[in-house]
């Protein structure tokens, strides 16, 4: 957020810092969203006890190419290997339209149903209303911090 403070203070010297800050926001949103997708897949929150044999099992690091440059992200995985992230799919290295999704999630006033339709239109898949609600709650926290 240093670049945004520079803008506010009138000491801004270039766009590189703003682009880097935007990439950081995209990284946080992708990681938060995929963690919420995993929570939905497993059926319980992080650090919550469960009777299931499947649980969180670290992260896979990957570099995604976007319009703003390369973004390094850590995508969560599950012990049984059954988790298939939908925002950034396995083996996907180019962020195709996901930036539109992120901007939409940041928009105020977009209902869960609108986000569902947006996902379906852009990517051809549906997430449950609860998963979308969890994702937007987490993203709104990041947007408010920003």
Image: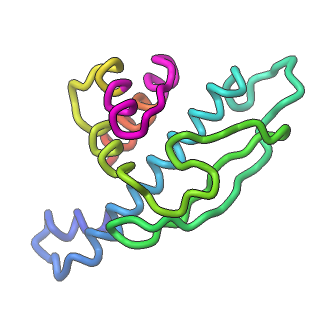
Instruction: Report which quarter residue 83 is drawn in.
Output: top right
Going by the image, does 74 lie left or right of 116?
right
Q: Which residues are magenta?
A: 116-134
Going by the image, does 63 lie left or right of 136?
right
- The quarter of the rendered structure image containing the N terminus is bottom left
Residue 54 x %, y %: 84, 30
Going by the image, does 35 lie left or right of 6?
right
Residue visible at 33% across and 68% down in the picture: 68
Residue visible at 43% across and 34% down in the picture: 124
Q: Main secondary structure of the magenta part?
A: helix
Residue visible at 35% across and 51% down in the picture: 97
Magenta-drawn stretch contains 122: yes
Residue 47 x %, y %: 74, 30
Q: How is the image coloured?
A: rainbow
| Placement of 40 over or under 7, stated as above or below | above
Instruction: Report which quarter residue 102 is drawn in.
Output: top left
């Amino acid at each position: 957020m240093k670049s945004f403070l520079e803008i506010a203070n009138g000491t801004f010297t270039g766009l590189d810092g703003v682009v880097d800050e935007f990439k950081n926001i995209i990284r946080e949103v992708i990681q938060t969203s995929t963690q919420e997708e995993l929570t939905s897949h497993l059926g319980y929150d992080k650090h919550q006890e469960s009777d299931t044999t499947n649980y969180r099992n670290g992260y896979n690091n990957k570099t995604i190419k976007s319009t703003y440059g390369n973004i390094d992200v850590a995508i969560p995985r599950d012990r049984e290997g059954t988790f298939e992230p939908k925002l950034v799919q396995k083996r996907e290295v180019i962020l195709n339209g996901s930036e539109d999704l992120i901007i939409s999630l940041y928009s105020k006033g977009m209902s869960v149903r609108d986000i569902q339709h947006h996902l379906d239109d852009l990517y051809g898949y549906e997430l449950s209303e609860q998963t979308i609600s969890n994702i937007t709650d987490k993203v709104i926290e990041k947007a408010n911090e920003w």
